[in-house]
Image (spheres, rainbow, N blue to C red):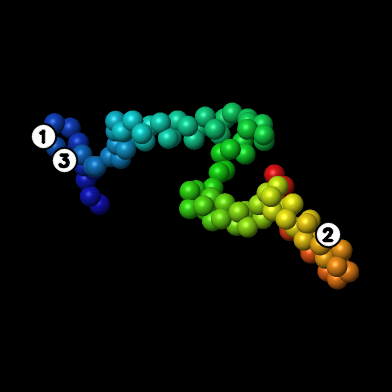
Amino acid sequence: EKTPRNFRLGGDIQPKRDLTRFVRWPKYVRLQRMKKIMIMRLKMPPAINQFNMTIDKNQAATLLRLLKKYQPETNEAKKARLMETAQQKKDGKEEKTKKPQVIKY
């Protein structure tokens, strides 16, 4: 059986301790940790919390590109479409032009 180690002056080398808790962390690290704890502790209404889950810039660009296809028609385009259907009705062709699909927001 080994004799116990002596950590007093002039004795054995002390074992390495985990000192990460006592490190002076950079300010941005401290801030993000404090924010995380605060968000966990505070209750937030869903109407405000929805802004914490936003999409990134790349995803937003693709979404806006998709929504542009379903943009409501302008007054001039609507007038032209209605004039075209009126002309067809006048000629007796009666071809129905579909109203374009739009996303209302």
Three-letter code for the amino acid on which mark 2 is drawn: Ala
Three-letter code for the amino acid on which mark 1 is drawn: Gly
Across and down, in percent, residue 3 comes to 21, 45
The C terminus sits in image quarter: top right
Q: Nearer the viewer, mark 2 or mark 1?
A: 2
- Which quarter of the picture shows residue 7? top left
Q: Where residue 53 is drawn, which disc sits there?
A: none
| Residue 1 shown left or right of residue 100 in the figure | left
- Which quarter of the picture shows residue 99? bottom right
Gap between marks 2 and 3 measured at Cα: 100 Å
- Which quarter of the picture shows residue 43? top right
Circle 2 sits in a helix, a strand or a loop, which is it?
Answer: helix
Q: Where residue 12 is drawn, which disc sits there?
A: 3
Gap between marks 2 and 1 measured at Cα: 105 Å
Residue density around tag 3, few if under 14, some if 14–19, many if 20 or more, within 10 Å? few
Q: Nearer the viewer, mark 2 or mark 3?
A: 2
Across and down, in percent, residue 74 comes to 68, 49
- Residue tagged 2: 86
The residue that appears at 48% across and 48% down in the rendered structure is: 57
Circle 1 sits in a helix, a strand or a loop, which is it?
Answer: loop
Can residue 6 be seen at all in this image of the molecule? Answer: yes
Residue 66 vs residue 87, the one in the foreground: 87
- Residue tagged 1: 10
The residue that appears at 25% across and 52% down in the rendered structure is: 1
Residue 66 vs residue 48, the one in the foreground: 66
